[in-house]
């Protein structure tokens, strides 16, 4: 029988996603492809509410510098937890 510790260590060694910068902030991303402005807005609002204006402004600047949707999604997942 495995313990909780052994399961956690196994999970992190199997290539799990890295921990986001603000893991206590969660954002639900839409299942369908929508405008990227909606994604940026949802994350910025969540950051502004849970962390502060500086974090939201920094994310907003970085998000608008992204070249494409995939790069933006990587930035979002590196910044907050997504569902």
Image (cartoon, grey):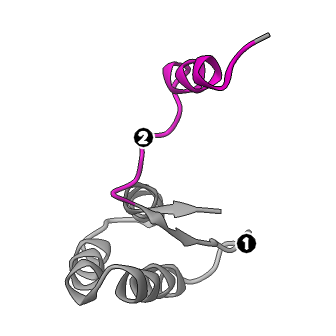
Reading the chain from its start, which is encountered first: label 2 or label 1? 2
The residue under the point 66% across, 26% down is: 4
Residue 77, given in percent of the width and then of the height, sits at 46, 57
Using the image as rendered, state which of residue 65 and residue 41 is in the foreground: 41
Residue 20, given in percent of the width and then of the height, sits at 40, 53
- Quarter of the image for the N terminus: give it: top right
Instruction: Kindly check if marks 2 and 1 are in contact, taking CB atoms under 8 A apart as contact.
Output: no
Residue corresponding to mark 2:
18
- 72 left or right of 33? left
* Number of residues whose C-alpha sits closer than 10 Å to that of mark 1, classed few (under 14), some (14–19) or many (20 or more): few
Q: Which residues are magenta?
A: 2-22
Residue 70, given in percent of the width and then of the height, sits at 47, 58
The residue under the point 60% across, 17% down is: 6
- Quarter of the image for the C terminus: give it: bottom right
Query: Against 42, is 15 above or below?
Result: above
* Displayed quadrant of residue 3: top right
Secondary structure, mark 1, is loop
Residue corresponding to mark 1:
32
Using the image as rendered, state which of residue 36 and residue 11 is in the foreground: 11
Residue 51 on the magenta span: no
Residue 3 on the magenta span: yes
Query: Against 70, is 50 above or below?
Result: below
Secondary structure, mark 2, is loop
* Displayed quadrant of residue 61: bottom left
């Amino acid at each position: 029988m495995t313990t909780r510790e052994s399961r956690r260590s196994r999970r992190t060694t199997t290539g799990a996603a890295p921990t986001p910068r603000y893991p206590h902030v969660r954002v639900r991303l839409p299942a369908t492809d929508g405008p990227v402005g909606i994604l940026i807005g949802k994350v910025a609002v969540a950051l502004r509410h849970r962390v502060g204006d500086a974090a939201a402004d920094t994310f907003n600047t970085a998000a608008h510098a992204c070249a494409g949707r995939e790069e933006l999604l990587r930035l979002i997942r590196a910044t907050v937890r997504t569902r």
